[in-house]
DNA sequence: ATAGGGTTAG
């Protein structure tokens, strides 16, 4: 039998409430007897309540009395909750029946937010105390209860699921929904949406889609929001065909897509480098009188910017204005970011000016784009000067903006300035700040300082990510600290941080730079998936060795190049770093030299 | 209830 949460009419709810609050005959009301979870006691226990105006400490020591107290406060959820909260401060340890009692009251009165936080407590409690079983709590809640007459108790299911989801305990939430009760109780669609949305946000797309299919089969009726999440999920996977199919599905069940569904699709297309199509969909929506807001235009503009079609982006901007929509700071920042990425600083600044002249305030996001662009264009000193100017003008600059400045300072060898600046402002550093500064020390030829900062970072409880390790590993290799680099790689693996292709590339480069080409070769041969960068690092390693004495190595380099071409790997398609491309040219030049 | 930008390596 399937129950739906909250689906009972409010009339029934009100009459439930009336009969509940009027009565003094407890045995008629499951709420009273089960709330005390003391079926072995006779109801007469509750007819003579003790004085409930005082919070005597002796009351707190006794579960029975706590339950009794909660019972008397059952019609006053506010007092019941504050009494319940105080118990903890007084050293009372909650158990299944006391949780059940307060949860019942919160359910009954529909205090859903309090219910959610109660379940957060319950989960925390169950994590600390292995003997505390969630299913026993639910057994207690529903013990002897006819759910048909006490629909409100079903809210507890949603509360628990929501608490799990907000703690990212997805498996527990799904397991609970699918298997815990004798019969499947469908979640409220809001709870369900919350679950699948969080799954998508955490990149658990396939789980989200699986759960969606499961619950549809069980009878859950999706709403607009559900469909928007599912469209987003398909787009995140790059599965645009299925994203479109959601619209067919909506048509089949007679749900008209709302503007969120449309916008989600438009954004998904643009994020997948299909901005032309995204724009077409936008225009189509517009022609069918479906509302299209500034958000959708931002997605299209951002999409064209990512595809380096700045003129298209700008034409969308003009089109939007023609439609009478007013551009906001997001629209402008999309354009500014686009021009910054294509290193067209003048244009970016011109748009920034025009934004300000329209009375739209700039912000740290826009400023960060511009500062970053300045740095990319080799104007590190302008980054610092501009940053100071902007800050003087009163614009709030956040941790990201600071990192851009740190990076500019570090890239120009001024890691100490960056460190001093940090001290001046008392900024709480995050992983990216530390990575930037560690890189700064490596660039400055101070590997010991870099290592020291790495340790500081860990002592602060920050967990270095693969980028941090890559920066430090390559910095240690470059600065003749190969042993420390290798130790760090071991430590990285111990910490469960996965190496990526950049790590492999840096290991090969590092070993080769130490003259350990054989070791690098063994490492290279042990790799299953080799990227173009990894091949080039190995080729380059072979080439580093003296040409005449080690012609054998160059033969190997040629073989690698050959292998790459056979696998349709283009050695010219190397990452964005200029140095790598120069490396490739070196390889080719050497090879040409060798073959002559 | 619904969604948005910028930063660290390559």
Image (cartoon, coloured by chain):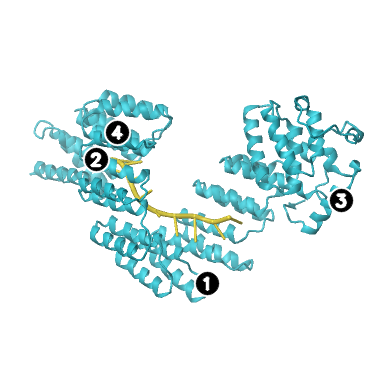
Callout 3: SS:
helix
Q: Work out which quarter of the rendered image holds the C terminus of chain A and state it.
A: top left
Which residue is painted at 36% across and 39% down in the image? A432
Q: Report in which chain the residue with disc 1 lies.
A: A
Picture coordinates of residue A249 (x, y %)? 59, 64
The first of marks 3 and 4 along the sequence is: 3
* Chain letter of the residue carrying label 2: A
Q: Which chain is yellow?
A: B
- First along the sequence among labels 4 and 2: 2
Disc 3 marks which residue? A19
Q: Tag 2 or tag 1, which sits nearer the N-term?
A: 1
Tell which circle, 1 or 4, labels the residue nearer the N-terminal end. 1
Give the mark count. 4
Q: CA distance from mark 1 to mark 2?
A: 49 Å
Q: Colour of chain A?
A: cyan
Residue pointed to by mark 1: A290
* Residue at (69, 42) in percent of width and height: A179
Where disc 1 sits, the SS reads loop
Secondary-structure class at tag 2:
helix
Q: CA distance from mark 3 to mark 1?
A: 47 Å
Residue A122 x, y percent position in the rendering: 66, 35
Label 4, label 2: how far apart the Cα atoms are: 12 Å
């Amino acid at each position: 039998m399937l129950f739906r949460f909250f689906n009972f009419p409010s009339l029934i709810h009100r009459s439930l409430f009336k009969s509940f609050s009027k009565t003094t005959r407890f045995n008629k009301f499951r709420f009273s007897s089960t709330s005390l979870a003391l079926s072995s006691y006779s109801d007469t226990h509750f007819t003579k309540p003790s004085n409930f105006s005082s919070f005597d400490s002796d009351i707190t020591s006794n579960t029975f009395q706590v339950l009794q107290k909660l019972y008397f406060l059952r019609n006053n959820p506010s007092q019941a909750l504050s009494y319940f909260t105080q118990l903890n401060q007084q050293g009372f340890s909650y158990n299944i029946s006391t949780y059940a009692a307060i949860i019942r009251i919160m359910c009954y009165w529909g205090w859903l937010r309090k219910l959610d936080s109660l379940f957060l407590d319950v989960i925390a409690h169950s994590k600390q105390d292995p003997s505390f079983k969630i299913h026993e709590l639910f057994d207690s809640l529903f013990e002897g209860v006819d759910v048909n007459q006490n629909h409100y108790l079903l809210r507890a299911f949603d509360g628990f699921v929501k608490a799990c989801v907000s703690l990212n305990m997805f498996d527990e939430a799904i397991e609970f929904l699918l298997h815990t009760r004798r019969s499947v109780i469908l979640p409220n669609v809001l709870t369900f949406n919350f679950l699948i949305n969080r799954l998508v946000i955490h990149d658990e797309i396939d789980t989200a889609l699986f759960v969606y299919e499961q619950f549809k089969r069980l009878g859950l009726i999706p709403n607009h929001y559900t469909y928007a999440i599912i469209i987003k999920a398909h787009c995140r996977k790059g599965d645009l065909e299925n994203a479109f199919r959601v619209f067919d599905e909506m048509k089949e069940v007679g749900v008209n897509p709302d503007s969120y569904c449309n916008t989600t699709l438009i954004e998904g297309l643009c994020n997948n480098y299909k901005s032309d199509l995204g724009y077409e969909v936008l225009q189509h929506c517009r022609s069918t009188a479906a509302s299209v807001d500034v958000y959708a235009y931002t997605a299209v503009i951002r999409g064209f910017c990512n595809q380096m079609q700045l003129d298209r982006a700008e034409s969308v901007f003009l089109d939007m204005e023609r439609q009478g929509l007013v551009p906001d700071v997001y629209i402008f920042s999309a354009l500014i970011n686009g021009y910054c990425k294509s290193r067209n600083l003048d244009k970016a600044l011109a748009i920034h000016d025009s934004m300000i002249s329209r009375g739209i305030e700039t912000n740290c996001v826009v400023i960060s784009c511009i500062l970053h662009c300045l740095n990319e264009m080799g104007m590190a000193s302008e980054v610092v000067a501009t940053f100071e100017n902007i800050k003087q003008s009163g614009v709030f600059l956040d941790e990201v903006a600071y990192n851009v400045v740190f990076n500019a300072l570090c890239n120009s060898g001024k890691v100490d300035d960056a460190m001093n600046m940090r001290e001046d402002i008392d900024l709480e550093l995050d992983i990216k700040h530390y990575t930037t500064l560690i890189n700064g020390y490596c660039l400055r030829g101070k590997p010991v300082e870099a290592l020291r900062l790495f340790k500081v970072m860990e002592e602060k409880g920050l967990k270095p990510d693969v980028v941090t390790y890559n920066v430090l590993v390559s910095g240690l290799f470059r600065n003749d600290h190969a042993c420390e680099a290798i130790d760090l790689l071991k430590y990285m693996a111990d910490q469960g941080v996965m190496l990526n292709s950049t790590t492999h590339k840096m290991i090969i480069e590092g070993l080769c730079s130490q003259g350990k080409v054989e070791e690098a070769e063994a490492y290279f041969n042990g790799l299953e998936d080799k990227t173009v960068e990894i091949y080039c690092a190995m080729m380059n390693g072979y080439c580093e060795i003296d040409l005449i004495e080690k012609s054998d190595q160059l033969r190997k380099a040629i073989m690698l190049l050959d292998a790459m071409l056979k696998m349709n790997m283009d050695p010219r398609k190397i990452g964005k770093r200029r140095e790598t491309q120069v490396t490739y040219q070196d390889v080719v030049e050497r090879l040409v030299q060798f073959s002559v």
